[in-house]
Image (spheres, grey):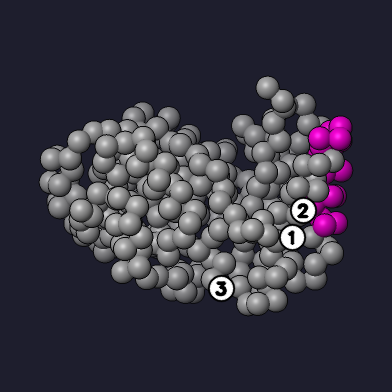
Amino acid sequence: MTQLLRSRAELRAVLTSLPRPVGLVPTMGWLHDGHRSLIRRARSENRTVVATIFVNPRQFNRAEDFSKYPRNEARDVQICAEEGVNIVWAPPVDEVFVPGFDTTISVGAIAMPLEGAARPGHFDGVATVVAILFGLVGAEHAYFGQKDAQQVMVIRQMARDLALPTQVIACATVREPDGLALSSRNVHLRPAERAAAPVLRQALLAAAAQWRLGERSGEALRTMLRSTLAGVPLAQPEYVSVADALTLGELDRIEGTALLSLAVRFGSTRLIDNELLEWPG
C-alpha cells in the first residue's frame, strides 16, 4: 500500500518500520513514463521505495516559471501506487525549508557552465533540496534521469563532498517514438512546437554520427549541432556544447569521453537533451 505523507516527522516515523535498502526517486511531480522507469529501477533494486513530489521554488530563476510548472498530485500519487511505491512524500514548502531556514549548498566548478550559466542559482537550489531529501530519507540509492546529465554530476559531487552515503544512480533517458526526451515541460509545447522539438535529438545524433566517423574537432561538432537546429526556425538555441564528460569543460579536440548537450527554446518552453560519446570498450 502506498502511503501519502506530508511532514518530516511522519516520514521519519514510517521509515523506521520499513525494510532496507531504500530507493529514493525525487520528483517535482507531473509524472510521466520517464519517472515510471526510475521508480521501476528503484523497485527492482530495493525493498522500500520512496518517491517525493515537491516543486522546489529555489531552483526556478523566474517566479512565473515556478507558478506555471504543471501539477496534478492525485494523478501522480496514483502512478506511484501503480508502480508499487511505498511512500509518497509530498510536503508543503515549510516542511522542506523550515521556518528560519538559512542554509544553501553551492557546488563548485561542475555547476558553473551550461545550465549553471544559463540559470544562475539553479543548481544551488537543486543541491540544497536534494541534500535535505538525502538527509531525511537516508536512502541507500537515489535515481535520476540521464536527460539532466549535469544535474546528476552536481548531485554526485555534492554527495561525495558532504560524505552523504546515498548512491546516485543515473538512468537512461526515456523518449517518445520520434526521439523527443520525455519532460514535464513538454505539456507546454504548442502543436507546431511539438512537431519541431525532435530536432534536439536529430542534432545530437547527427553530431554523434560524425564523431563515430572519426571527427574529433569539438568546434566541428558544435557547428553540426548548430546547423541542424538552424534548419528548424522554431528552434532557438540557448547553447550547444561539446564538453569533457567529467569536467564539462568545452573541448577543442575530443581525446576521451565527451558529452554533447544543448538547450533550446520553442516559444516560451525551454528543453534540454544530451548524448554521451564513449569510446568502444
Q: Are marks 3 and 1 in contact (CB under 8 Å)?
A: no
Percent of width and height locating residue 55:
39, 62
The reply to whether residue 162 is visible in this rendering is no
Q: Which residue is mark 2?
A: 203
Callout 3 amino acid: His
Label 3 vs 1, first from the N-terminus: 3
Q: Are marks 2 and 1 in contact (CB under 8 Å)?
A: yes
Q: Is residue 70 magenta?
A: no
Q: Residue at x 65, y 34 (%)?
A: 245
Disc 2 to disc 1, how far (Cα)?
6 Å
In this view, the residue in front, 38 or 226, is: 38
Residue 194 horizontal side relative to residue 41, left or right:
right
Callout 1 amino acid: Val
Q: Which residue is mark 1?
A: 199
Q: Quadrant of residue 202?
A: bottom right
Callout 2 amino acid: Ala
Label 3 vs 2, first from the N-terminus: 3
Q: Residue at x 87, y 43 (%)?
A: 220
Q: Secondary structure at mark 2?
A: helix
Q: Quadrant of residue 2?
A: bottom left
Q: Quadrant of residue 166?
A: top left
Percent of width and height locating residue 84:
30, 50
Q: Which residue is mark 3?
A: 188
Count neighbours of disc 2 (C-alpha within 10 A) and say few if under 14, some if 14 to 19, many if 20 or more: many
Percent of width and height locating residue 181:
60, 56
State the extent of the magenta-drawn residues as a range. Answer: 211-228
Disc 3 to disc 1, how far (Cα)?
17 Å
Question: What secondary structure prevails in the magenta region?
Answer: helix
